[in-house]
Image (spheres, rainbow, N blue to C red):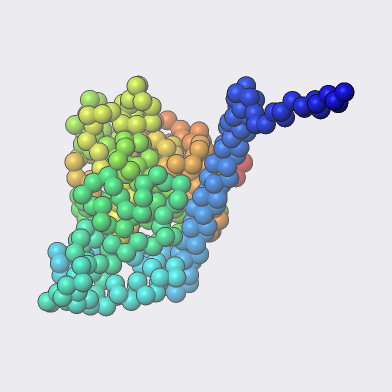
Amino acid sequence: MHAPPPRRRPASRSGFTLIELVVVVLIVLILISLLLPNVEQAREAARRSQCQNNLKQLGLAMHNYHATHKLFPTQGGGTSAAGEEGNAEELSAFVALTPYIDASRHWNVIAQRLAENADGSPRTPPWPAMGPEPGNRNYGPWQTQNSVFLCPSDPAGPANTGGPEDVMADTNYAFNAGDNAAGGYGAVEVEGGGRPAARGAFVFREWIALDDFADGTATTLLFAEIGRGDGGRSYQGYALRNAGAAKPPLEYDDERGVLNPSACLAAAGNVSEPQTYPTAAALHARGSRWNDAGGVYTGFNAILPPNGPSCLLTNDPRSPGLLSAGSFHTGGVQVGMVDGSVTFISETIDAGDPGAAGVTDGESPYGVWGALSTRAGGDTVDVDQY
Protein backbone atom coordinates (compact mmCIF):
# COMPACT_ATOMS: atom_id res chain seq x y z
CA MET A 1 0.00 0.00 0.00
CA HIS A 2 1.08 3.44 -0.75
CA ALA A 3 1.42 5.92 2.11
CA PRO A 4 -1.26 8.57 2.07
CA PRO A 5 -0.15 11.95 0.69
CA PRO A 6 0.91 14.44 3.35
CA ARG A 7 -1.75 16.86 4.46
CA ARG A 8 -1.37 20.31 3.12
CA ARG A 9 -1.28 23.02 5.68
CA PRO A 10 -3.74 25.75 4.98
CA ALA A 11 -2.11 28.73 3.32
CA SER A 12 -1.08 31.29 5.97
CA ARG A 13 -3.14 34.49 5.83
CA SER A 14 -1.17 37.65 5.03
CA GLY A 15 -2.10 41.37 5.14
CA PHE A 16 -4.97 43.10 6.97
CA THR A 17 -8.65 42.81 6.65
CA LEU A 18 -10.65 45.85 5.67
CA ILE A 19 -11.90 46.25 9.23
CA GLU A 20 -8.36 46.15 10.59
CA LEU A 21 -7.25 48.80 8.08
CA VAL A 22 -10.13 51.04 9.04
CA VAL A 23 -9.24 50.67 12.73
CA VAL A 24 -5.57 51.54 12.06
CA VAL A 25 -6.53 54.59 10.00
CA LEU A 26 -8.89 55.78 12.72
CA ILE A 27 -6.18 55.40 15.36
CA VAL A 28 -3.73 57.39 13.23
CA LEU A 29 -6.30 60.14 12.65
CA ILE A 30 -7.05 60.34 16.38
CA LEU A 31 -3.34 60.64 17.17
CA ILE A 32 -2.91 63.38 14.56
CA SER A 33 -5.90 65.29 15.92
CA LEU A 34 -4.38 65.11 19.39
CA LEU A 35 -0.90 66.13 18.29
CA LEU A 36 -1.69 68.95 15.82
CA PRO A 37 -2.99 71.45 18.40
CA ASN A 38 0.11 70.86 20.50
CA VAL A 39 2.35 71.39 17.47
CA GLU A 40 0.54 74.62 16.57
CA GLN A 41 0.69 75.82 20.17
CA ALA A 42 4.42 75.19 20.20
CA ARG A 43 4.84 77.10 16.95
CA GLU A 44 2.80 80.03 18.24
CA ALA A 45 4.82 80.05 21.47
CA ALA A 46 7.98 80.33 19.36
CA ARG A 47 6.46 83.12 17.26
CA ARG A 48 5.29 84.98 20.34
CA SER A 49 8.76 84.63 21.87
CA GLN A 50 10.27 86.16 18.73
CA CYS A 51 7.85 89.10 19.00
CA GLN A 52 8.90 89.55 22.61
CA ASN A 53 12.57 89.52 21.64
CA ASN A 54 11.89 92.17 18.98
CA LEU A 55 10.32 94.45 21.58
CA LYS A 56 13.28 93.91 23.91
CA GLN A 57 15.65 94.79 21.09
CA LEU A 58 13.68 97.95 20.28
CA GLY A 59 13.63 98.94 23.94
CA LEU A 60 17.40 98.50 24.17
CA ALA A 61 17.82 100.58 21.00
CA MET A 62 15.72 103.34 22.56
CA HIS A 63 17.93 103.44 25.64
CA ASN A 64 21.10 103.40 23.57
CA TYR A 65 19.75 106.32 21.56
CA HIS A 66 18.87 108.13 24.80
CA ALA A 67 22.36 107.49 26.18
CA THR A 68 23.78 109.23 23.13
CA HIS A 69 21.31 112.11 22.72
CA LYS A 70 19.80 112.44 26.24
CA LEU A 71 16.36 112.24 24.60
CA PHE A 72 14.18 109.64 22.92
CA PRO A 73 13.73 110.11 19.14
CA THR A 74 10.66 112.00 18.00
CA GLN A 75 7.76 110.98 15.83
CA GLY A 76 8.01 113.46 12.98
CA GLY A 77 11.75 113.85 12.56
CA GLY A 78 13.78 114.52 9.45
CA THR A 79 14.28 117.50 7.16
CA SER A 80 11.91 120.40 6.48
CA ALA A 81 12.04 120.19 2.67
CA ALA A 82 9.17 118.27 1.10
CA GLY A 83 8.42 116.09 -1.90
CA GLU A 84 11.42 114.40 -3.47
CA GLU A 85 13.84 116.89 -1.95
CA GLY A 86 13.08 116.08 1.69
CA ASN A 87 10.79 114.19 4.03
CA ALA A 88 8.76 117.13 5.43
CA GLU A 89 9.63 116.07 9.00
CA GLU A 90 7.32 113.06 8.68
CA LEU A 91 9.74 110.26 9.55
CA SER A 92 8.85 107.82 12.32
CA ALA A 93 11.16 107.32 15.28
CA PHE A 94 12.06 103.92 13.81
CA VAL A 95 14.25 105.66 11.23
CA ALA A 96 16.35 107.29 13.97
CA LEU A 97 16.61 103.90 15.72
CA THR A 98 17.99 102.14 12.64
CA PRO A 99 21.70 102.43 13.59
CA TYR A 100 20.89 101.01 17.04
CA ILE A 101 19.21 97.79 15.86
CA ASP A 102 22.10 96.16 14.04
CA ALA A 103 21.18 97.84 10.77
CA SER A 104 24.07 100.26 10.34
CA ARG A 105 24.39 99.46 6.63
CA HIS A 106 20.76 100.40 6.10
CA TRP A 107 21.26 103.58 8.12
CA ASN A 108 24.36 104.57 6.13
CA VAL A 109 22.34 104.45 2.92
CA ILE A 110 19.56 106.59 4.43
CA ALA A 111 21.96 109.11 5.98
CA GLN A 112 23.81 109.82 2.72
CA ARG A 113 22.80 111.07 -0.71
CA LEU A 114 21.70 108.17 -2.91
CA ALA A 115 22.25 108.23 -6.66
CA GLU A 116 19.90 105.42 -7.68
CA ASN A 117 16.21 104.56 -7.58
CA ALA A 118 14.63 101.52 -5.96
CA ASP A 119 14.91 99.59 -9.23
CA GLY A 120 18.64 100.36 -9.49
CA SER A 121 18.31 102.94 -12.25
CA PRO A 122 20.39 106.14 -11.87
CA ARG A 123 18.79 109.24 -10.40
CA THR A 124 19.84 112.80 -11.16
CA PRO A 125 19.97 114.68 -8.88
CA PRO A 126 20.60 112.08 -6.16
CA TRP A 127 18.06 111.44 -3.43
CA PRO A 128 18.79 113.72 -0.46
CA ALA A 129 20.31 112.53 2.81
CA MET A 130 17.53 111.25 5.12
CA GLY A 131 15.45 110.53 2.05
CA PRO A 132 12.26 111.90 0.50
CA GLU A 133 8.79 111.78 2.06
CA PRO A 134 8.07 108.38 3.63
CA GLY A 135 5.46 107.39 1.05
CA ASN A 136 7.84 107.65 -1.92
CA ARG A 137 7.93 104.24 -3.60
CA ASN A 138 10.95 105.04 -5.78
CA TYR A 139 13.36 105.35 -2.85
CA GLY A 140 14.89 101.95 -2.09
CA PRO A 141 15.64 102.28 1.64
CA TRP A 142 11.94 102.79 2.44
CA GLN A 143 11.33 99.34 0.94
CA THR A 144 14.08 97.58 2.92
CA GLN A 145 12.40 95.31 5.46
CA ASN A 146 14.12 94.82 8.82
CA SER A 147 12.92 91.64 10.51
CA VAL A 148 12.99 93.24 13.96
CA PHE A 149 9.93 95.28 12.95
CA LEU A 150 7.82 92.20 12.13
CA CYS A 151 6.01 89.71 14.36
CA PRO A 152 5.78 86.23 12.77
CA SER A 153 2.37 85.68 14.42
CA ASP A 154 0.87 88.22 12.03
CA PRO A 155 -0.80 86.45 9.07
CA ALA A 156 0.32 89.20 6.67
CA GLY A 157 3.49 88.45 4.75
CA PRO A 158 6.72 90.48 4.82
CA ALA A 159 5.03 93.23 2.79
CA ASN A 160 1.54 94.62 3.21
CA THR A 161 -1.00 93.06 0.85
CA GLY A 162 -3.89 95.26 1.93
CA GLY A 163 -3.45 98.21 -0.39
CA PRO A 164 -1.41 100.08 -3.01
CA GLU A 165 1.58 100.50 -0.67
CA ASP A 166 2.43 96.81 -0.78
CA VAL A 167 6.03 97.46 -1.81
CA MET A 168 6.77 99.48 1.33
CA ALA A 169 8.41 97.80 4.33
CA ASP A 170 6.06 97.20 7.27
CA THR A 171 5.99 97.24 11.06
CA ASN A 172 4.09 95.34 13.75
CA TYR A 173 5.11 97.77 16.48
CA ALA A 174 3.85 101.26 17.24
CA PHE A 175 4.66 104.18 19.54
CA ASN A 176 2.55 105.26 22.52
CA ALA A 177 0.76 108.58 21.93
CA GLY A 178 -1.12 108.57 25.24
CA ASP A 179 -4.79 108.60 26.15
CA ASN A 180 -6.36 111.61 24.44
CA ALA A 181 -5.59 111.11 20.73
CA ALA A 182 -4.09 114.61 20.58
CA GLY A 183 -0.58 113.26 20.02
CA GLY A 184 -1.40 113.95 16.45
CA TYR A 185 1.26 112.30 14.33
CA GLY A 186 0.40 115.00 11.86
CA ALA A 187 -2.27 116.81 13.89
CA VAL A 188 -2.55 120.51 13.17
CA GLU A 189 -1.31 123.06 15.64
CA VAL A 190 -3.87 124.37 18.11
CA GLU A 191 -5.05 127.95 18.00
CA GLY A 192 -2.34 130.30 19.28
CA GLY A 193 0.47 127.93 18.27
CA GLY A 194 2.01 124.90 19.88
CA ARG A 195 1.06 121.26 19.82
CA PRO A 196 -1.91 119.61 21.53
CA ALA A 197 -1.43 118.38 25.07
CA ALA A 198 -0.46 114.82 24.16
CA ARG A 199 0.29 112.68 27.20
CA GLY A 200 2.16 109.65 25.89
CA ALA A 201 5.81 108.73 25.45
CA PHE A 202 5.81 110.24 21.95
CA VAL A 203 4.53 113.61 20.78
CA PHE A 204 4.63 114.70 17.17
CA ARG A 205 7.83 116.70 16.55
CA GLU A 206 8.75 116.90 20.22
CA TRP A 207 11.54 115.05 22.05
CA ILE A 208 10.86 113.38 25.40
CA ALA A 209 13.53 112.53 28.00
CA LEU A 210 13.51 109.88 30.72
CA ASP A 211 13.14 112.63 33.32
CA ASP A 212 9.72 113.49 31.81
CA PHE A 213 8.19 110.17 32.96
CA ALA A 214 6.90 111.25 36.34
CA ASP A 215 4.45 108.31 36.46
CA GLY A 216 7.36 105.85 36.43
CA THR A 217 9.29 104.13 33.65
CA ALA A 218 8.21 100.63 34.72
CA THR A 219 4.50 101.49 34.40
CA THR A 220 4.48 103.63 31.25
CA LEU A 221 4.08 102.21 27.76
CA LEU A 222 6.71 102.82 25.10
CA PHE A 223 5.65 100.39 22.35
CA ALA A 224 2.74 98.07 21.68
CA GLU A 225 1.99 95.58 18.95
CA ILE A 226 -0.30 96.39 16.05
CA GLY A 227 -1.55 94.08 13.30
CA ARG A 228 -1.01 94.71 9.60
CA GLY A 229 -3.47 94.62 6.75
CA ASP A 230 -3.63 91.11 5.32
CA GLY A 231 -6.50 91.52 2.91
CA GLY A 232 -9.18 90.84 5.52
CA ARG A 233 -11.14 93.29 7.68
CA SER A 234 -9.78 92.58 11.15
CA TYR A 235 -9.71 95.21 13.87
CA GLN A 236 -6.01 94.48 14.38
CA GLY A 237 -4.98 95.16 10.79
CA TYR A 238 -7.04 98.18 9.78
CA ALA A 239 -8.48 101.55 10.78
CA LEU A 240 -11.97 102.72 9.82
CA ARG A 241 -11.86 105.86 7.67
CA ASN A 242 -14.05 108.94 7.96
CA ALA A 243 -15.62 108.13 11.33
CA GLY A 244 -16.39 111.84 11.67
CA ALA A 245 -19.19 111.27 9.17
CA ALA A 246 -20.61 108.22 10.95
CA LYS A 247 -23.88 108.22 12.89
CA PRO A 248 -23.24 109.14 15.62
CA PRO A 249 -20.12 110.95 14.39
CA LEU A 250 -16.73 110.64 16.04
CA GLU A 251 -16.06 114.07 17.54
CA TYR A 252 -12.65 115.64 17.98
CA ASP A 253 -11.26 118.66 19.77
CA ASP A 254 -7.77 119.93 18.89
CA GLU A 255 -6.81 120.27 22.55
CA ARG A 256 -8.63 117.44 24.30
CA GLY A 257 -8.61 114.87 21.53
CA VAL A 258 -11.46 112.44 20.88
CA LEU A 259 -14.62 113.37 22.76
CA ASN A 260 -16.74 110.21 22.28
CA PRO A 261 -14.85 106.91 21.76
CA SER A 262 -18.20 105.10 21.91
CA ALA A 263 -18.91 106.42 18.40
CA CYS A 264 -15.98 104.40 17.07
CA LEU A 265 -17.36 101.25 18.70
CA ALA A 266 -20.73 101.89 17.08
CA ALA A 267 -19.31 102.59 13.61
CA ALA A 268 -17.03 99.55 13.71
CA GLY A 269 -19.63 97.12 15.07
CA ASN A 270 -20.28 93.99 13.02
CA VAL A 271 -22.82 91.62 14.59
CA SER A 272 -22.42 88.95 11.92
CA GLU A 273 -18.63 88.75 12.29
CA PRO A 274 -17.24 90.14 15.58
CA GLN A 275 -13.78 91.72 15.66
CA THR A 276 -14.09 92.76 12.02
CA TYR A 277 -15.31 95.95 10.40
CA PRO A 278 -18.58 96.08 8.43
CA THR A 279 -18.29 94.92 4.84
CA ALA A 280 -19.08 98.35 3.38
CA ALA A 281 -16.66 100.26 5.62
CA ALA A 282 -13.74 102.14 4.03
CA LEU A 283 -10.52 101.01 5.69
CA HIS A 284 -6.84 101.89 5.81
CA ALA A 285 -4.19 99.25 6.48
CA ARG A 286 -2.15 99.71 9.65
CA GLY A 287 1.62 99.23 9.92
CA SER A 288 2.14 99.49 6.16
CA ARG A 289 5.01 102.02 6.39
CA TRP A 290 7.68 101.48 9.05
CA ASN A 291 9.20 104.88 8.28
CA ASP A 292 6.09 107.08 8.51
CA ALA A 293 5.11 109.07 11.63
CA GLY A 294 1.45 109.03 10.60
CA GLY A 295 -0.48 107.42 13.45
CA VAL A 296 -2.22 104.81 11.31
CA TYR A 297 1.23 103.50 10.34
CA THR A 298 3.29 103.62 13.55
CA GLY A 299 1.17 104.96 16.42
CA PHE A 300 -1.43 103.86 18.97
CA ASN A 301 -3.32 105.43 21.86
CA ALA A 302 -4.68 103.73 24.97
CA ILE A 303 -8.35 104.69 24.80
CA LEU A 304 -10.13 101.56 23.56
CA PRO A 305 -8.64 98.30 24.90
CA PRO A 306 -6.19 96.11 22.97
CA ASN A 307 -7.65 94.37 19.91
CA GLY A 308 -10.39 97.00 19.74
CA PRO A 309 -11.25 98.94 16.57
CA SER A 310 -9.39 101.98 15.25
CA CYS A 311 -11.19 104.98 13.73
CA LEU A 312 -9.80 107.91 11.72
CA LEU A 313 -11.68 111.19 11.85
CA THR A 314 -11.57 111.74 8.05
CA ASN A 315 -10.53 109.83 4.94
CA ASP A 316 -7.00 111.22 5.33
CA PRO A 317 -4.73 108.55 6.88
CA ARG A 318 -2.98 111.34 8.77
CA SER A 319 -6.13 112.56 10.44
CA PRO A 320 -6.40 112.17 14.23
CA GLY A 321 -8.59 109.56 15.81
CA LEU A 322 -8.59 106.36 17.83
CA LEU A 323 -5.74 103.97 17.10
CA SER A 324 -5.90 100.80 19.15
CA ALA A 325 -3.10 98.36 19.88
CA GLY A 326 -3.67 94.84 18.59
CA SER A 327 -2.01 91.54 17.77
CA PHE A 328 -2.79 88.06 16.49
CA HIS A 329 -1.74 86.39 19.73
CA THR A 330 -4.68 84.94 21.60
CA GLY A 331 -6.20 87.28 24.17
CA GLY A 332 -4.11 90.43 24.05
CA VAL A 333 -0.90 92.20 23.04
CA GLN A 334 2.72 92.38 24.07
CA VAL A 335 4.02 95.80 25.05
CA GLY A 336 7.39 97.36 25.80
CA MET A 337 7.65 99.66 28.81
CA VAL A 338 9.85 102.73 29.11
CA ASP A 339 12.27 100.88 31.40
CA GLY A 340 12.89 98.31 28.65
CA SER A 341 10.80 95.50 30.13
CA VAL A 342 8.25 93.57 28.04
CA THR A 343 4.93 92.23 29.27
CA PHE A 344 1.63 90.85 27.97
CA ILE A 345 -1.52 92.95 28.33
CA SER A 346 -4.90 91.20 28.23
CA GLU A 347 -7.57 92.55 25.91
CA THR A 348 -9.87 92.47 28.96
CA ILE A 349 -7.73 94.98 30.89
CA ASP A 350 -9.72 97.71 32.65
CA ALA A 351 -10.12 100.43 30.01
CA GLY A 352 -12.47 102.70 31.92
CA ASP A 353 -15.42 104.44 30.32
CA PRO A 354 -15.59 104.46 26.48
CA GLY A 355 -17.96 107.40 26.77
CA ALA A 356 -15.40 109.56 28.56
CA ALA A 357 -14.02 112.55 26.67
CA GLY A 358 -10.31 113.14 26.25
CA VAL A 359 -8.37 114.94 28.96
CA THR A 360 -5.25 117.10 29.00
CA ASP A 361 -4.21 116.64 32.62
CA GLY A 362 -4.93 114.54 35.69
CA GLU A 363 -5.72 110.86 35.91
CA SER A 364 -6.81 108.98 32.82
CA PRO A 365 -10.55 108.24 32.37
CA TYR A 366 -9.63 105.05 30.48
CA GLY A 367 -8.84 102.84 33.45
CA VAL A 368 -5.59 100.97 33.96
CA TRP A 369 -4.98 100.84 30.21
CA GLY A 370 -5.15 104.63 29.91
CA ALA A 371 -3.07 105.11 33.06
CA LEU A 372 -0.29 102.98 31.57
CA SER A 373 -0.06 105.35 28.61
CA THR A 374 0.43 108.67 30.42
CA ARG A 375 3.92 109.83 31.24
CA ALA A 376 2.88 112.39 33.88
CA GLY A 377 -0.86 112.05 34.53
CA GLY A 378 -0.49 111.37 38.22
CA ASP A 379 -1.88 107.83 37.85
CA THR A 380 -0.73 105.13 40.25
CA VAL A 381 -0.65 101.68 38.67
CA ASP A 382 0.24 98.46 40.42
CA VAL A 383 1.73 95.66 38.32
CA ASP A 384 -0.97 93.32 39.68
CA GLN A 385 -3.56 95.39 37.79
CA TYR A 386 -2.40 94.31 34.33
- Quarter in which the C terminus is drawn: top right
Residue at the location (12% across, 76% down)? 124
Left or right of 193? Residue 260 is right
Residue at the location (22% across, 55% down)? 193
Q: Quadrant of residue 230?
A: top left
Q: Image height check: is 150 above or below 65?
A: above
**Percent of width and height locating residue 307:** 42, 37
Q: Image height check: is 266 above or below 351?
A: above
**Percent of width and height locating residue 116:** 19, 74
- Front one among 360 and 343: 343
Left or right of 327? Residue 25 is right
Residue at the location (19% across, 77% down)? 115
**Percent of width and height locating residue 120:** 21, 72
Q: Quadrant of residue 360?
A: top left
- Front one among 191 and 43: 43
Decide if residue 309 is in sight here: yes
- Quarter in which the N terminus is drawn: top right
Decide if residue 206 is in sight here: no
- Front one among 128 and 371: 128
Number of numbered discs: 0
Q: Image height check: is 363 above or below 78?
A: above
Residue at the location (15% across, 75% down)? 122
Q: Quadrant of residue 289?
A: bottom left
Left or right of 166? Residue 362 is right
